[in-house]
Image (cartoon, rainbow, N blue to C red):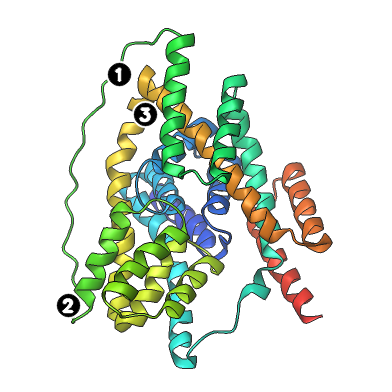
């Protein structure tokens, strides 16, 4: 038998990891990032905790879906531009296929029965996965009293309603000031240079709604920070208020589908695109909302090691990393209130966290077990 060459092994490895995550990454960005940390840092040693945190900090400072951009960063670090494309396709396309299938069924049946019962066993497992990642990353990022104070302040202010982007910026600025006061800065490193990528043209038939759909979602993917609820505000302004292509009920259903299915929440765009423009609309919307993330990651990724060598930008990254973990903890608290609603769900979450802390079990198996247990509980 001919031995497998390194390139084919790398392709199979990257696709295997990200396709599996694309089918099983329930729970939104915080859970996705926790699962990416488990795959890339804990199990496969592709990155160190410090490298992962730096990528997370950079991702939080650019628009677009954070977990998707983290997958792209990891693929790019692992195998350059081909790795980025493989990671992106593996992570995005399974979720797109699931959402598109549900969109077709939705149109045929004029609605969908609720999917929440399927996730009653998944949600506690997701909380455990996120807590496990927070414990691992917190050991690396939060060192010293000022770092704990910063993380706690970000957590508290987020729960009080402060904007997450403002908190990230303030976290970075606070870390820079602390370093300036407590430690003399080193010489500033060079910022490096950017190579402008070239892009092939998008070959698609431009029907009446396809081009507008592509441009609207390209705009959203280029400027949107925040959660699925922020996405809801953008979509309502364009598709309900300005164009009148969707009703409020259809839009809420689209966001709900993006949240209860695995993979990126931004696959709600696929659902909206199908409702507004059929199959061409679904393709245009999907490409439009995710394309900016690919561009941002290609531009930003080569700069991160150079920024880390600079005293100023290194401190800025540290502050953003700490603030990111504070935000992640705050979101986990909010998710926990919705997920851990009785003794059964609380027990499932505690058992899942204990398994993760004591073993190296792949979280995917816990997700599948939670899905099965939730289904059995609903039936009996």
3 and 1 marks in contact (CB < 8 Å): no
Cα separation, mark 3 vs mark 1, equals 10 Å
Indicate whether 85 appears above or below 154: below
Q: Earlier in the sequence, mark 3 or mark 1?
A: 1
From this view, report whether residue 22 is shown above or below residue 328: below
Q: Which mark is residue 237?
A: none
- Quarter occupied by residue 212: bottom left
Gap in Å between the C-alphas at discs 1 and 2? 47 Å
Task: Give the residue displayed 43% in from the left and 31% down from the top.
Answer: 170
Seen in the image, is 356 located left or right of residue 230? Answer: right
Residue 100 pos. (x, y %): 43, 77
For the residues marked 2 and 3, what is the alpha-carbon distance in whole angstroms?
41 Å
Q: Residues within 10 Å of mark 1 (few under 14, many from 20)?
A: some
Dot 3 falls on a residue whose secondary structure is: helix
> Where does label 1 land, which residue?
189
* Residue visible at 30% across and 16% down in the picture: 188
- Residue at position x 62%, y 49% from top? 332
- Neighbor class of circle 3 (other Cα within 10 Å; few <14, some 14-19, many 20+) is some
Q: Is residue 3 visible?
A: no
Q: Earlier in the sequence, mark 1 or mark 2?
A: 1
Query: Quick one: 251 or 196, which is closer to the camera?
Result: 251
Q: Position of residue 244 (x, y in %)?
A: 30, 79
Q: Residue furthest top?
A: 184
Which residue is tagged 2? 206
Question: From what the image shows, is residue 199 above or below residue 176?
Answer: below
Residue 300: x %, y % from top left = 31, 39
- Labelled pair 1, 2 in contact (Cβ < 8 Å): no
Q: Can you tell which of label 2 and label 3 is closer to the viewer?
A: 2
Name the element at disc 2: loop
Looking at the rendered structure, which numbered label has been put on residue 305?
A: 3
Q: For the residue labelled by badge 1, is the local secondary structure a helix, a strand or a loop? A: loop
Q: Quadrant of the C terminus?
A: bottom right
């Amino acid at each position: 038998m001919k031995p497998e060459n390194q390139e084919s092994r790398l392709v199979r490895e990257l696709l295997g990891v990200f396709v599996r995550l694309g089918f099983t990454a329930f729970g939104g960005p915080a859970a996705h990032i926790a699962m990416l940390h488990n795959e890339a840092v804990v199990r496969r040693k592709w990155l160190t905790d410090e490298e992962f945190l730096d990528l997370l900090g950079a991702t939080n400072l650019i628009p677009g879906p954070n977990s998707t951009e983290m997958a792209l960063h990891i693929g790019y670090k692992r195998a350059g531009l081909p790795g980025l494309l493989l990671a992106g396709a593996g992570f995005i396309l399974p979720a797109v296929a699931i959402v598109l299938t549900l969109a077709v069924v939705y149109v045929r049946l004029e609605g969908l029965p609720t999917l929440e019962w399927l996730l009653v066993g998944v949600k506690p497992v997701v909380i455990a996965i996120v807590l496990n990642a927070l414990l691992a990353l917190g050991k690396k990022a939060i060192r010293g009293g000022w770092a704990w104070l910063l993380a706690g302040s970000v957590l508290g202010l987020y729960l009080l309603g402060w904007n997450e982007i403002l908190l990230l910026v303030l976290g970075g600025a606070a870390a820079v000031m602390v370093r300036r006061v407590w430690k003399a800065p080193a010489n500033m490193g060079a910022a490096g240079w950017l190579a402008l990528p070239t892009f092939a043209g998008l070959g698609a038939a431009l029907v009446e709604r396809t081009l507008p759909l592509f441009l609207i979602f390209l705009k959203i993917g280029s400027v949107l920070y925040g959660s699925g609820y922020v996405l809801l505000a953008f979509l309502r302004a364009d598709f309900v208020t300005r164009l009148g292509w969707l009703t409020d009920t259809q839009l809420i259903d689209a966001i709900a589908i993006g949240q209860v299915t695995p993979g990126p929440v931004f696959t709600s765009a696929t659902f909206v695109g199908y409702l507004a423009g059929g199959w061409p609309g679904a393709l245009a919307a999907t490409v439009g909302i995710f394309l900016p993330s690919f561009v941002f990651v290609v531009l930003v990724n080569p700069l991160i090691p150079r920024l880390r060598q600079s005293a100023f930008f290194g401190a800025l990254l540290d502050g953003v990393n700490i603030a990111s973990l504070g935000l992640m903890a705050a979101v986990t608290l909010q998710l926990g209130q919705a997920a851990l609603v009785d003794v059964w769900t609380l027990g499932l979450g505690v058992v899942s966290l204990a398994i993760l802390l004591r073993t190296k079990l792949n979280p995917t198996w816990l997700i599948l077990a939670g899905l099965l247990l939730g289904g059995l509980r609903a039936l009996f």
